[in-house]
Amino acid sequence: MMLESAIIDEVELYEVEIPFKEPFEISGGVSHTRKSLIILLKSDGVVGYGESAPFEFPFYSPETLDSVRNMLISYFFPMIVGRKVNSIEELNEILNRNVRGNNFAKAGVETAYWDLIARKNAIPLKELLRWKMEQIGVPSEYTASRGYVESGISIGIPVDRDLGKLREAIERALEDGYKRVKVKIKPGWDIEPLKISREILGYDFPLWTDANGAYTLDHVDLFLEMDRYECLFHEQPLHVQDYLGNLELANRIKTPICLDESLKSELIARQVLKLNISRIWNLKIQRVGGLLEALKIYKIAVENQVKLWGGTMPETGLGASFILCFASFAGFVYPSDVEPSSRWFEDGRDIVDLRMQDGRIKVPSDPGIGEISEDRIVRFGKKICTMRGDTK
């Protein structure tokens, strides 16, 4: 019998800041550091860890570091601290009660609870995920998992648009053993990057683009030109809310499209299927508000032959450990966005060190998401909130 209940005795919130090795630019903005919020849920001597990982500015989602911090301290923490939560489903009901959106904030609390429950049961998170999949009726063949995920690299837009730097990044990715390459694109940075990518990778190596919604239907001819580079798909080519535009683009070009930012909930996933917009989905835990919602989307996907892969923001290694566990299941068919810590940070400067060997990252086998060094949380951040049940 799996124990899902816990009394939340105390909550702690840390804000960490870890510099990236180099700036990471997408079509909407650029990040120089990973600023993130680390959440500790404490219950009867056991600690569960989670992460809320929005960007500082609202170029990816409406949520920002400031808005998430405020929601956690002012709203979500008071709702759960000192309270007995009976199940993962009940926690989600609490977090979603009279609260629209705020998925990054919800995901931080919700993933910390999954980690807490896994640790209380002394099992790896992956086993708790499998158990919950069985509970909600995921077909048995899709509750099987691997002991690793294949890692793909996401190459941002060089700050100075230097094609030579792009070439070096792709060549280095091949040398490092990544299983696929994703190239960030936007208008004015698309055809030449793809041309160089194929020159280096050839046409048998998995390649796709990610526009983060930077294009419109006025760019159809450009996408028709990109067809020649035989990408596996274009990730989120049009605006997050332009569902019909993405559908029309998909019908007019040869290369399939994949949804990312548009896919925010189980409800939207069902509508995407009904409209037949896309059958390739990037599943991000942060974007959909936690693991339970992600599992519901997973169930819909595998029942309808949708191809999945696991995306990241990127989070720190702590937050990435959740999608690392999830993306090991059989429904995920493409290499994930989970990359080794060395891709983003200098040695020893991630909260959890993720290591890649032969293009693969091992799934944690210790309880929860594995061993967490609170010393690193303290070293890279500062505590900004402690809330106890007796001071609620």
Image (cartoon, rainbow, N blue to C red):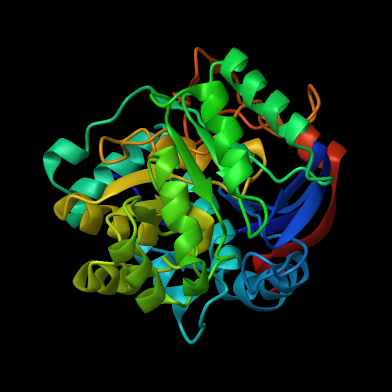
Residue 265 is left or right of residue 306, and the answer is right
Residue 160 is left or right of residue 316, and the answer is right
Residue 167 is left or right of residue 301, and the answer is right
Q: Residue 21, relative to residue 53: is it above or below?
A: above
| Residue 247 visible to an observer of this rendering | yes
User: Percent position (x, y) of residue 305?
Assistant: 18, 50
User: Percent position (x, y) of residue 337?
Assistant: 52, 39
Give the quarter of the figure containing the C terminus: bottom right
Q: Residue 195, relative to residue 277: is it above or below?
A: above
The single residue placed furthest to the bottom in the displayed view is: 98
Q: Residue at x 69, y 67 (%)?
A: 59
Give the quarter of the figure containing the N terminus: top left
Q: Which residue is drawn at 78% across and 45% down?
A: 161
Q: Toward which corner of the image does residue 386 lie, by quadrant?
A: bottom right
Q: Toward which corner of the image does residue 320 lie, by quadrant?
A: top right
Q: Toward which corner of the image does residue 13 lie, by quadrant?
A: bottom right
Task: Name the one closer to the observer, 266 or 165.
Answer: 165
Q: Which residue is drawn at 29% across and 69% down?
A: 272
User: Percent position (x, y) of residue 358?
Assistant: 50, 12
Task: Name the one closer to the observer, 224 or 117.
Answer: 224
User: Percent position (x, y) of residue 250?
Assistant: 33, 62
| Residue 1 visible to an observer of this rendering | no
Q: Residue 139, relative to residue 349: is it above or below?
A: below
